[in-house]
Amino acid sequence: MGGITDETERAASNKVKRMDKITLSVLCDNSAAMKEGIRAEHGFSILIERGNTKVLFDTGQSDVFWHNADVMGKDLSSIDTVVLSHGHYDHTGGLLSLARSSVNVQVIAHRDVFVARYKKQKDGSLKYIGCPYTQAYLESRGINFKFVTPHYEVAPDIFYVSEVPQANDFEKGDPLLVVKDEKGLSVRDPFMDDASLYIKTPQGLVVILGCSHRGVVNILEHILTLAGNVPILTVVGGTHLSRVDPRQTKKTIEALKGMNIQTIGVSHCTGLEAADEMKRSFGKRFFRAMAGVVITIYEKGGVVLQ
Ligand SMILES: [Fe+2]
Ligand SMILES: [Fe+2]
């Protein structure tokens, strides 16, 4: 009898221990941290671990995320779920690596993730930048898709958010990123599928962004509306400020400062100039979330970077 109680207590205390932190491992980014063997690639992928839950958010554009996970000692064979932030090739191209592995996962996304997407070139032509594979092909290779509602609990206290309202007047989206309308004419990509994740902790929220095509301020304000006006402990991911007018960057940073974000780590499409601007504004609360960086968020407070 005593043995059972001990075992139960040990299991209970282990559970508390396992749930007391969130680990975010950046597996793919445009820049690589100065760590041996880590590769950079234009794209984004991040592994979220909390207790026994493992969620992979985006897959980069190739198998670089898988290589970096190996170098970082992260086992992707036990991933529960993959979530896609949107349909661009630099977030979805790595899906085939999952199919080639023995991992049998469910991929969560917005149903627009396979919409054909393009980038306008200087000569006016359109370059395809959508998912490199069709849904049917990926399914034939053993990947299962689940198209979810715009606010969906992926795992306990880990929420997916898409179809973010474009509420402010300065985050207007990128005019070079387009889709084709029914007449075949290019129109601005509405990015209804642009998705982020937020994790609820006792101290506040951890937010993970993909490309922020609907606007990073719009996204964070929408998440605060959904989650309640609680503190934001950490924001990590792409903010798509690399091609915007400096005046917009300024407005974005001002709005972010007003949100009392405790730490912010930018990746991917943020751009070096905007990242430098943020570093000046956020000081020690700022970091670059490059490939190879591991962010540990302790639920009793504190963020540790490795
Ligand atoms: Fe991207
Ligand atoms: Fe994108």
Image: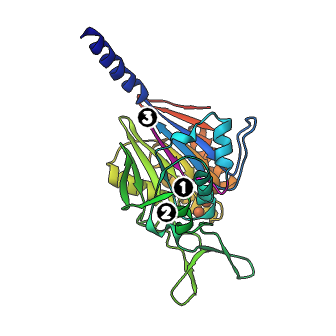
SS under mark 1: loop
Mark 2 lies within 8 Å of ligand 2 (Cβ measured): yes
Q: Position of residue 69 (x, y in %)?
A: 63, 40
Q: Amino acid at mark 1?
A: Gly
Q: In the rendering, which numbered label is found on residue 210?
A: 1
Q: CA distance from mark 3 to mark 2?
A: 27 Å
Up/down of 261 relative to 164, above or below: above
Give the residue at the far bottom of this rendering.
183
Residue at horizontal 47 percent and vertical 65 percent from the top: 193
| Residue that numbered label 3 is attached to | 52
Nearer the viewer's eye, disc 3 or disc 2?
3
Q: Are marks 2 and 1 in contact (CB under 8 Å)?
A: yes
Ligand 2's image quarter is bottom right
Up/down of 46 relative to 147, above or below: above
| Residue that numbered label 2 is attached to | 194
Mark 3 lies within 8 Å of ligand 1 (Cβ measured): no
Return the disc, 3 or 2, that comes first in the chain's sequence.
3
Residue 170 within the magenta-colored segment of the rendering: no
Q: Which residues are magenta?
A: 51-62
Return the disc, 2 or 1, that comes first in the chain's sequence.
2
Residue 59 within the magenta-colored segment of the rendering: yes
